[in-house]
Amino acid sequence: MSTLFSKEIEGKKYNFQPFEINQQTSYRVDVKDSEEKRHEFRMEKLSDDQWELDGENIPEWINENKEALIRAISEHE
C-alpha cells in the first residue's frame, strides 16, 4: 500500500493517508482553509472507477478540486 503524501492544489496543502476497505485502497484527506480550519473527508473509489468524496460539510471549493485530487492520487500510486 502507498504511504502518506501531500500535494499542493490551488495553493492549499492536501494530506492523503491511504487505508484499505473491502480490499480497495481509499484515502483519508485533510486540508486547512484560509482561516486555518481543518477539513477532513474520505475519497473512495467506486466499482465503476469513479471516485466519491465522503464527509460532512465538505466546502464547495474542495468539491471543485475533485479532479485534481483524483490526479494527485493517480500520480502517487
Image (cartoon, helix red, strand yellow):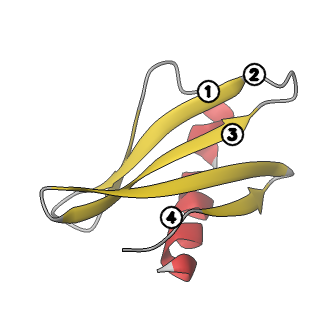
* Residue for badge 4: 70
Please, is residue 5 above or below residue 51 in the view?
Answer: below
For label 1, the SS is loop
Q: Alpha-carbon distance for marks 2 and 4?
A: 22 Å
Q: Amino acid at mark 2?
A: Lys
Q: Amino acid at mark 4?
A: Ile
Q: Amino acid at mark 1?
A: Pro
Q: In the shown orientation, is residue 36 left or right of residue 55?
A: right
* Mark closest to the chain's N terminus, 4 or 1: 1
* Residue for badge 3: 31
Could you classify mark 1 by the number of other residues whose Cα lies within 10 Å: few (under 14), some (14-19), or many (20 or more)?
few
* Residue for badge 1: 59
Residue 34 horizontal/vertical position (percent): 87, 29
Please, is residue 38 above or below residue 21 in the view?
Answer: above
* Mark closest to the chain's N terminus, 3 or 1: 3
* Residue for badge 2: 37
For label 4, the SS is helix
Q: Residue at x 50, y 64 (%)?
A: 70
